[in-house]
Image (cartoon, helix red, strand yellow):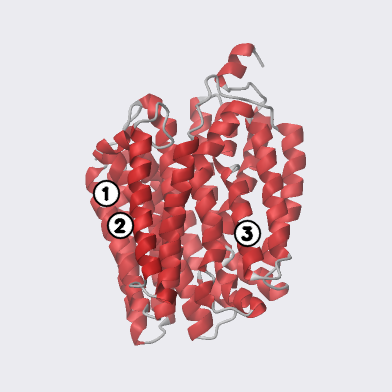
Amino acid sequence: MTATDAARGTIALSARRRWAILAVCASALFLVGLDTTIVSIGLPQIGLGLGLDVDRLAWVIDAYTVPFASLLITAGALADRFGRRRVFQIGLVVFAVASLAGAAAPSLGWLIAARALQGVGASMLTPVALAIVVGVMTDPRERAQAIGIWASVFGVSLAAGPLTGGALIAAFDWRAVFWINVPVVLVALILVAVLVPESRAAHARRLDIRGQVLLVLLIGGMVAVLIEAPHVGWTSPVVILGIGAVLLTALGFFWAESRSRQPLIDPHLFRHPGFAGAVAGAVALFVGFSVTLLLTTVLLQGGEGWTPLAAGAATLPMAIGAIVGAPLSGYLVGRAGPRIPLLVAGALLTLGGALLTTLAAGMNLTALLVAFLLIGLGVGLGNPPITNTAVNSLPLDRAGVAGGVTSTARQVGTALGIALAGTIAASESFVSGWIIITACGAVLLGVAALAPARPEHR
C-alpha cells in the first residue's frame, strides 16, 4: 500500500481478499439488520418471561434503534479519524458483550440497557464496514457491484429477522435471539484481524459533540413520548411537558447545526427538494415496515394464538419480496432512473396497507400473506432509489453526507414505527396501524414526483 493510497483510504489488494473482506463486513451488517427485527417476534415470550405486558416492551426494540440511529454519523467520523478497522473491532466487541448481557437479563431495565449498548455497537459497524468495503474496492464497476450486494444483505437481514427469531425461540427460548450473536461475532473478529487492513480518511471531519447530544435527545424524546403517552394519558402534564421539550430540542438542534462549521446534519441540505424528499421517503418506508412487523406479531401471537415459529414463518413472503425487490430496483434505477421504482414501491406499500385493513373483519390468511408480499416488495424496491435520489440531489462532494443522513433517516423511521406500533397495540386499534402503512405508501408516491425521471451517471 502506498502513502497516497493510505491518505485516500483506498488499498490495493488481491481480488480474492477484497471479496473476502466484503463477506466479513456483510456478515456484520447482517447481524445489525437482524437484531433490528429478530426481537420483535419474541416480544410476547419476553413479556411472559419478565412478567410484563407486550405493549410495554416497545422499548426493547427502540432502545436499540435510538442509539443506532443517533450515532451513525459520529461513528463514521471517529473511524475516519482513529482507524476504520479499530473502530469496527470495538463495535464488534461492544455488540457481543451487549448480546451476552441481553441473554442474561433478569429484568426489563437490564434488557433495555443491554439493547441500548447493542445499538451503540451497531452504530460502529454499519457506516464503518461500508467505508472499509469502499476503500478496498478501487475499481468503480467492482465497487458498484459490492455496494449492490451490501444493500441487498441489509434488506434481507431485516426481513429474515422474524423467521430466524421464531426458529430460535421454538428450539430454545427468547434468550437465544441474543446469545446467537456471540459465536458469529467471535468468528468475525478473527477474520477482521487476518483480512482487513487499517485505513483512515485523508481529512477527518471534526466531531460535532453539541449536535450529537441534541440529536440523541431529539430522537429519544420523540420515541419516549410515543411509547409512554398511551399509559399516562396524552393530556397528562408529563406528556405535555415532553412534547414541549421535544419541540425545544428540535429548535435547538436546528439552531446549533445552522451555526456549526462542520455540522452533524446540515439543515441547509434540506433546501434541495430531492434530498428532503428522499429523507422523508426513507423515514416513511421504514415506519411502514416497522409498524407492519410489530403489529402483525402482536395480532398473530396475542390475538390469534400463533406460536413464534408460525408467526415468523408467516413473514416469509415479506422476506421473499425484499430479496426480489432490492436487485430488481437496482436494475431499474440504472436503466430508467429512480422515479419508476419509487412509484411502484409506493403503490405496493399502499396496496399492502389497504389489504391489511380487511383483517378488521377477521383473520384472512390469504390477505395477510399477499399483504406481506406486497409490503416486502415495496421495501425492497423503495430502498435503492431513495439513496440514489438523495446522493444525486446534492453536489458530488456531498455524496457521503447524503448516504449518512439517509441511513440515519431509515433508523429514525424504524424507531418511530416501533413506538407508533406500541401505542396502537396498547389501544388495540389495529386498523389505525394499517392506515399508517397506507399513508407511508402515499408519501413514497409523493417522493417519486421529486425524483429524477431518468438515470443520472456521475
> Vertically, is 59 above or below 232?
above
Rendered-image quadrant of the C terminus: top left
Q: Which residue is mark 3?
A: 113
Q: Secondary structure at mark 3?
A: helix
**Which amino acid, by three-letter code, is at mark 3?**
Ala
Q: Is residue 40 left or right of residue 105?
A: left
> Residue 36 appears at what percent x and percent y?
55, 58
Q: Which residue is mark 1?
A: 447
Q: Between marks 3 and 1, how big is the CA–CA gap? A: 36 Å
**Which amino acid, by three-letter code, is at mark 2?**
Gly
> Residue 222 appears at what percent x and percent y?
41, 58
**Which amino acid, by three-letter code, is at mark 1?**
Val
Which residue is painted at 58% across and 17% down in the image?
7
Which residue is painted at 50% across and 27% down in the image?
206
> Residue 191 appears at what percent x and percent y?
74, 39
> Vertically, is 307 above or below 162?
below
State yes or no: discs 3 and 1 in contact (Cβ < 8 Å). no
- What numbered label is drawn on residue 346? 2
Crowd tier of the residue under label 2, counting other residues whose Cα lies within 10 Å: few below 14, some 14–19, many 20 or above = many
**374 or 356: nearer the eye?**
356
Which residue is painted at 37% across and 69% down in the image?
237
Residue 265 falls in image quadrant:
top left
State yes or no: discs 2 and 1 in contact (Cβ < 8 Å). yes
Q: Nearer the viewer, mark 3 or mark 2?
A: 3
- Earlier-in-chain disc, 3 versus 1: 3
Whether residue 334 is visible to the viewer of this picture, yes or no, is no
Q: Is residue 455 left or right of residue 328?
A: left
Rendered-image quadrant of the N terminus: top right
